[in-house]
Image (cartoon, rainbow, N blue to C red):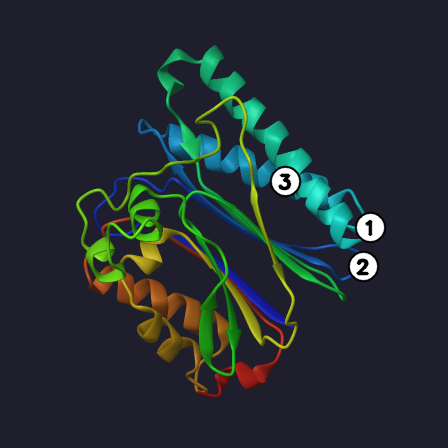
Amino acid sequence: MKSFYLTDTGRVRTHNEDSVTILKNANNEYLMIVCDGMGGHRKGEVASSMAITALGSRFNKISSIGSKLDAVNWLNDNVNEINKNILEYANNNPDSMGMGTTIVVALLTHDYLIFGNIGDSSGFVMKKGQLHKVTKDHTLVNLLVQAGNLTEEEAKFHPKRNVLMKALGAANTVELDIFDVVDMTFDAILLCSDGLTNMLTKEQIEKVLNDPELEIEEKVSKLIRKCNARGGTDNISIAYLVINERSHES
């Protein structure tokens, strides 16, 4: 397996509110996380950093995540605790009111892969050279699409496409959406903030990831360069884990 993660401020924002990591424990299980903070005055980065640091440190303390049910409970318990901590921080720091963060996580063991998300950071699996989105965005436009009030194409350019319906730190209770990947024949896992998916199409991302001439670090870096070449209107964060090299095949 090979993994690499990177975050970039982009070309418009003055600072980076994203946080990203990939961790491996003693049992060769992987935890991937991308968080996209919000709140301004650099407080978004506090929220995203709190989420990554807390979840990562707790993962590092365990030798194995256990069964799939154990993993789901572990994610839910920890994300709820992190949500409380973000709310408490905001209450104790008046200039931080309104801060929050999206979160998308992937937990890969020898037996299963599960994703969890709150907000609009995305989780994909790569299979035979094609990206398949696993998570679902908690955005206003996605709700409108699901209700049949907007088409997918209309949603891409909707003026309120970035309005979140759920985020860590936005409510006293929060529910992590869990996605169980039943088909384990995927070749790679990609997590990203919307700074990537708002700038590049799925096909453009696939083209870079399928380039056999590039190492994993070069692929991730190239995706960020492409986002910036198209304007880089947001922070860009990517976590990429390759299981099988055949993911280069298109």
Q: Which residue is mark 1?
A: 63
Report helix, strand or loop for mark 1.
Answer: loop
Q: Amino acid at mark 2?
A: Asn
Identify the mark nearer the N-term, 2 or 1: 2
Q: Residue at x 40, y 26 (%)?
A: 99
For disc 3, the neighbor class at 10 Å (few under 14, some 14 to 19, many from 20) is: many
User: How far is disc 2 from disc 1 in space, using C-alphas?
Assistant: 6 Å
Q: Which mark is residue 101?
A: none
| Front position in the image: 155 or 246 | 155
Report helix, strand or loop for mark 3.
Answer: helix
Q: Which mark is residue 27?
A: 2
Q: Amino acid at mark 3?
A: Leu
Question: Mark 2–mark 1 contact, CB under 8 Å?
Answer: yes
Q: Is residue 224 above or below residue 235?
A: below
Q: Which residue is mark 3?
A: 55
Identify the mark nearer the N-term, 3 or 1: 3
